[in-house]
Amino acid sequence: MTVKVRFAPSPTGRIHVGNIRAAIVNWVFARGQGGVFVLRIDDTDLARSTQEYEDGIEADLTWLGLTWDERYNQSKRFDLYHRAMETLKAAGRLYPCYETADELDRRRKVQLSRGQPPIYDRASLKLTPEEIAAFEAEGRKPHWRFKLEGKRVKWTDLVRGECDVDTTSMSDPVLIREDGAFLYTLPSVADDIDMGITHVIRGEDHVANTGTQIEIFEALGGAVPTFGHFSLLVGADGSALSKRLGSLSIMQLREDGLEPLAITSHIGKLGTSDALEAAGSLDELGRNFDFAKMGRHPARFDEADLARINAGVLHAMDYAAARPRLAALGADLGEDFWLAVRPNLKLFGDVADLARIVGGEVTPVVEDPAFLATALELLPTIVDASTWSAWSSAIKEATGAKGRALFLPLRQALTGMDHGPEMGPLLALIGRDKAAKRLAGETA
Ligand code: GLU
């Protein structure tokens, strides 16, 4: 059996931290299993869906490297949903209801005041053809409810193990509104059957839906897929994800300069027993992904982890991958430069400042000209990668300075900064000419 999964966003906003987990987990699972990843745009809500958001979803997934093998729009598949609707009607599982929202609301209040659960009482199921005709004559349009069997629906969840949902405690769900619009529940099942989806992997906020949807799969005669419901993200302190974090968009993280692999590594490993560290690649994430590693506890999303993982991605990035991006920043100063500076990067863009030390001008910070004059006298005529350690030892011997008192003035003069990459490779990259001028206090 080939694994086939889908990510099914509604194009009513940009993808954010709160909903990208479904895309990443589905993608890495499919990749690890040699399976198929489907992008399904859930745009049955024509009023709220926009082309702009749809394009945004594609741009975000593409940037993250989450490419899809097949792609569908629900808005182009209404024929399929109508056929599913007719099948359910013919089986007596879809029935018209004529209550107005006000009537339903009043009934719910009465039930609650009597201490009863506010479950739909199926009054419309008992309507006679004459009563229905009278409503129609009044101009009322029906909405359509799915008649639940009222049983324990069971499944073995990839994350939560043995699960069951008692559909006797649920109202028959509305599948089609008065205006004929399909709500999410039925199209999703019709699509999952039609596309041959083998695994439905989504957040635990869908657990109750799964009870209903399994009944619909069965009523339509489709194969019931395997379900997996991962826990929801919470904030670093364990409380609900704040509005700001929950709606932090992938677009925003991209604009902030974060690496796509940092985001996929972080969110792909959250809530699993794997250490929260940068993966070498998306494929590696796929190879290592296993539902058995995923816990039921809420997964903590901490921006500090993301920043740390982002640095990890940069520290492991090879020159071939960095080169085009260095060139775009005018900072491609060769492989030695990249290897010297990458351990100091938090964001890729930080490299521009470091490139200036080697390829641009630096105004040296000079506090003790005499100390630097001694250093200059001791600077060998040929400066290479081995110079730094012998040279700084010679300065130490000549001046008695050691530790910070030895290294800081040299760094300040040579780079104009207090902190930065290791001086050994940097000095070789700066070269003797510029180094000599900077030690003499000149901008060079
Ligand atoms: N469009 C639905 C959502 O975003 C899809 C849920 C599902 O994966 O079935 O919640």
Image (tube, grey):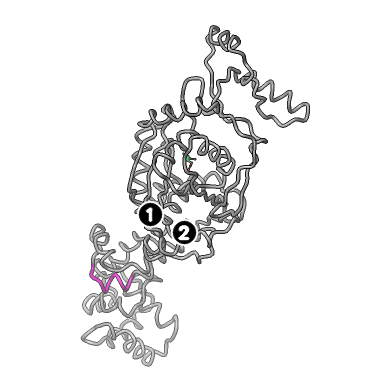
Quarter of the figure with the C terminus = bottom left
Residue that numbered label 1 is attached to: 35
- Between marks 1 and 2, how big is the CA–CA gap? 22 Å
The residue at 26%/74% (across/down) is 336
In this rendering, the answer to whether 33 lies above or below 227 is below
Q: Is mark 1 within 8 Å of ligand 1?
A: no
Circle 2 Cα neighbour tier, 10 Å, few/some/many (<14 / 14–19 / ≥20) = many
Query: Which mark sits nearer the N-terminus, 1 or 2?
Result: 1
Residue that numbered label 2 is attached to: 266
The residue at 54%/12% (across/down) is 140
Question: Which SS does the magenta portion mostly show?
Answer: helix
Q: Amino acid at mark 1?
A: Gly
- Please say whether residue 56 is one of the residues in the magenta stretch: no
Circle 1 Cα neighbour tier, 10 Å, few/some/many (<14 / 14–19 / ≥20) = some
Left or right: residue 279 versus residue 146 is: left
Frontmost residue, 85 versus 330: 85
Q: Amino acid at mark 2?
A: His
